Amino acid sequence: MSDRVAPAATEDTQDWQPSDVQRDRDEWRRRRTLRSAVIAVGSTLLLLGAVGGGVVSSPGWDRVQETYFSWDKAVSSFPAVLEGLWLNIRVMAICWVLILLLSLTVAIVRTLRGPVAFPLRLLGTAYVDVFRGLPLLLVIFLLGFGGPALRLQGLPTSPLFWGCSALVLSYSAYVAEVFRAGIESVHPSQRLAGRSLGLSYGQTLRHVVLPQAWRRVIPPLMNDLVSLQKDSGLIAVLGVTDAIRKAQIETSLDFNYTPYVVAGVLFCCLTIPMARLTDRYARKKGYHGAGGVL
Amino acid sequence: MSELLRLDGVRKCFGDHVVLRDVDLTIEPGQCVVLIGASGSGKSTLLRCVNLLEVVDDGVITFDSRDITDPRVDGDEVRSRMGMVFQAYNLFPHLDVIGNVTLALRLVHGVAAEEARSRGLAMLDRVGLAEKAQARPDDLSGGQQQRVAIARALVANPRLMLLDEVTSALDPELVGEVLDLLTELKGEGVTMLLNTHEMGFARDVADQVCFLHDGRIHERGTPEQVLGDPREERTRTFLSRIRA
């Protein structure tokens, strides 16, 4: 490539001055961006103002404010609700790890090829069908009260353990389908390319298919994680006290519903940063969504 | 002002990298202009700028006597009057062949389903694929897919066809069927701006050949002159490489 002329980029870039036409265009684009921003901010404030004003000026607002948005009650109930939330967080974290493991296994089993794997596929399909069909609350009741009653040696009888088991079993069925969709969305030619290099089925899955599938399913996985965070409260029906349960107890003292609002705000405070973090992680992994100028 | 397309001082950068600099070009109705040059010389970017798929960083592109690089211009409307064909066909795999060809007719040009269908079938007949109307793109050969893509771009009677290395993804024996079709279109007076590595085809069909190097048009002229007796050293080097 001796005859290849080095691009005159640096010198050219420094010398280059935009033409008058381009200056006009840039100016117009700047003005339009500014105008769009002003309109967007203005209309947002207007909408929020209208909704807020409508609520605040309603005839019953004083009593609603006292019952749901009492600052004193919020402060006094905050420690208890926070303590309950800690349980939600622990349940969510432990269950999420187990759910990822179980669901990934089920998804891989369901995508196995060949007649040898038929019984496994059947098992995986049956599991997903049954646990996606059963309402979560029903599974919690079944395992939460039925599990300890089995008196199995070596297994704890705490409602927390059995509640978490119910969550894991139920959620893994959904998440397995997310993983399976991801695995099947990787183009078959990728699998072929891996095998053609001499990689085994498992190596191809581990090093070629799953990394691509994983980054495609991050957004729906996030969806299920947020959902789990809230459903983790359902095991309160077995007698453990999570944030909602704590809020209920606080409320029952004086029929002021502010603790529920406190719990709601705390849940949002957990979810929203997590969503932003996941977005960043997904972008780093090369998930771009729609892009380009169009 | 008989020209259909005119580029004046077009410049395009991706970050610090200048892809096109000071490109001037005119195309008259019915003309065929062929861009040649090595990969990365800016041929595809030039086509994408004309189709407003990229926003130019300076310069003016005039199409049908209107400055289409003005940010106030409705890009969708401009694109609806051009037809673009891509190297990788870019057919919609979820639609059958006739669905691909009639999509824009129905959605953009407001043609009734019945008429769109008959126009689509006529266009498929024109590219020799009438019997494949119900087939899925995946069931066609590369050459057939590219002919469907040409039919899709052509069905709304665009003023200008942009063809971006339309034979580069094809097997050698399939290249001919696509190039023959383009030669026929040229004979019918379709205005074309295209880039290609097929020098024989460029020689047959081009009214003007432009050699791009490093984002600049280094040499332009009739195919006999540019391909047969290039003045520029760079053009000679490029041609000798691809003929080797």
Image (spheres, helix red, strand yellow):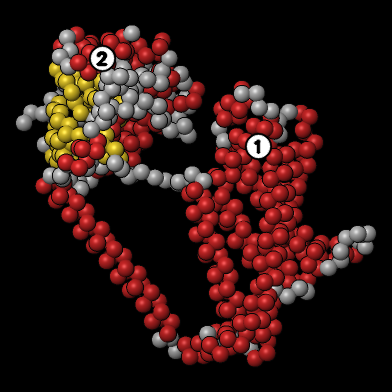
For this rendering, which residue is in front, B152 or B240? B240
The reply to whether residue B77 is in sight is no
B102 lies left or right of B194? right
The residue indicated by pointer 2 is: B237
What's the chain of the residue with tag 2? B
Is B207 placed above or below B27 here?
above
Badge 1 and badge 2 in a common chain? no
Which quarter of the image is occupied by the C terminus of chain A? top left
A226 lies left or right of B227? right
Mark 1 and mark 2: Cα distance apart in space: 47 Å
Q: Residue at x 14, y 51 (%)?
A: A24
B244 lies left or right of B216? right
Q: Residue at x 41, y 18 (%)?
A: B170
Q: Residue at x 40, y 12 (%)?
A: B172
How many numbered badges does the structure rendering display?
2
The location of residue B225, given as percent across then percent down, is: 15, 11
Is B188 placed above or below B24 here?
above
The three-letter amino acid code for the residue at tag 1 is Arg
The residue indicated by pointer 1 is: A206
Identify the element where label 1 is drawn. helix
The three-letter amino acid code for the residue at tag 2 is Thr
For this rendering, which residue is in front, A207 or A70? A207
Is A68 placed above or below A240 here?
below
Which quarter of the image is occupied by the N terminus of chain A? top left
Q: Quadrant of residue A203?
A: top right
